């Protein structure tokens, strides 16, 4: 008697683990919840601890759904509208760069504008700008779309594909959990750094975010030039 089922499950589990690691490793450096946590804390500085925790949970949930949609249907949407990934990178990179530039110069306006900004911060939305473009920007969306555009080879067993898809979705869930933990406990990190250290880290994170936006624009432009040549 030959038992083939255990080998089959072992293969499926191996594919699921590989998909999990691929998705998590590809998205974590781009989402970078550790680096954006100080910016999240600054944008939600007028919220109470419980409100900030709820906001962190909402951002994590929104990020998971946005990345899941990009992974599953992103490539189909781009094909439908005739949009290429390089164009998405250029347009989204400009948004990220503008957002990072604004954060970099936050706090340099007169006192009356500071008060207005603080009042506006009370109603900061969990989707914009906390989820997009701060947490899930065009870079991570492009990666998710690219990962989702990889079709299974012809003849691939449906159970194999289900296991791999499950591993990819689990990777997105792990990203969402990481976002929540980093944002939820951002205040603890800032308490250790102090006001001056927090300000320095926030400015540095904003500058890095600005540089990431410029890099995304450059990558999109380079891809366009390469495809045209």
Image (spheres, rainbow, N blue to C red):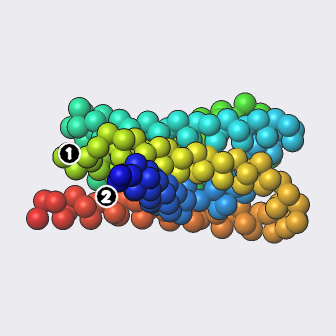
Note whether residue 23 is visible. Answer: no
Q: Nearer the viewer, residue 31 or 227?
A: 31
Closest to the camera, between mark 2 and mark 1, is 1
Residue in the foreground of this view, choosing between 112 and 204 = 204
Q: Quadrant of residue 219?
A: bottom left
Residue identified by numbered label 1: 155
Q: Which mark is residue 220?
A: 2
Q: Are marks 2 and 1 in contact (CB under 8 Å)?
A: no
The mark tally for this picture is 2
Q: Position of residue 214 (x, y in %)?
A: 43, 62
Q: Is residue 215 visible?
A: yes
Residue reaching furthest to the front: 1
Secondary element type, mark 1:
loop
On the picture, is 168 further left or further right than 101?
left
Residue at 62% from the left image edge and 37% from the top image edge = 61
Estimate the x, y position of residue 13 in percent, counting from the top left. 46, 53
Q: Is the residue marked by circle 2 packed among few (<14), some (14-19), or many (20+) residues within 10 Å?
A: many
Query: Left or right of 188: which side holds 114?
Result: left
Question: What mark, if any, has residue 55 been given in the picture?
Answer: none
Residue 220 image position (x, y, % from top left): 31, 58
**Residue shown at the point (20%, 45%) measured from the top left:** 155
């Amino acid at each position: 008697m030959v038992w083939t089922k255990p080998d089959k499950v072992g293969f499926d589990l191996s594919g699921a683990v590989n998909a999990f690691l691929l998705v998590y490793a590809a998205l974590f450096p781009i989402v970078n919840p550790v680096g954006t946590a100080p910016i999240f804390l600054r944008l939600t500085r007028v919220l109470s601890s419980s409100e900030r925790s709820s906001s962190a949970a909402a951002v994590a949930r929104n990020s998971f759904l946005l990345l899941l949609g990009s992974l599953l249907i992103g490539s189909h949407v781009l094909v439908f509208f005739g949009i290429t990934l390089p164009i998405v990178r250029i347009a989204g990179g400009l948004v990220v760069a503008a957002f990072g530039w604004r954060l970099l110069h936050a706090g340099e306006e007169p006192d009356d504008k500071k008060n207005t900004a603080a009042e506006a911060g009370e109603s900061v939305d969990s989707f914009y700008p906390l989820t997009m473009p701060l947490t899930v920007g065009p870079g991570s969306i492009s990666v998710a779309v690219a990962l989702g555009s990889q079709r299974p080879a012809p003849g691939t067993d449906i159970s194999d594909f289900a296991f791999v898809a499950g591993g990819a979705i689990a990777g997105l869930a792990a990203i969402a959990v990481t976002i929540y933990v980093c944002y939820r406990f951002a205040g603890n990190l800032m308490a250790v750094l102090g006001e001056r250290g927090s300000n320095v880290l926030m400015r540095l994170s904003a500058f890095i975010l600005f540089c990431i936006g410029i890099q995304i624009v450059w990558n999109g432009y380079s891809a366009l030039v390469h495809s045209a040549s």
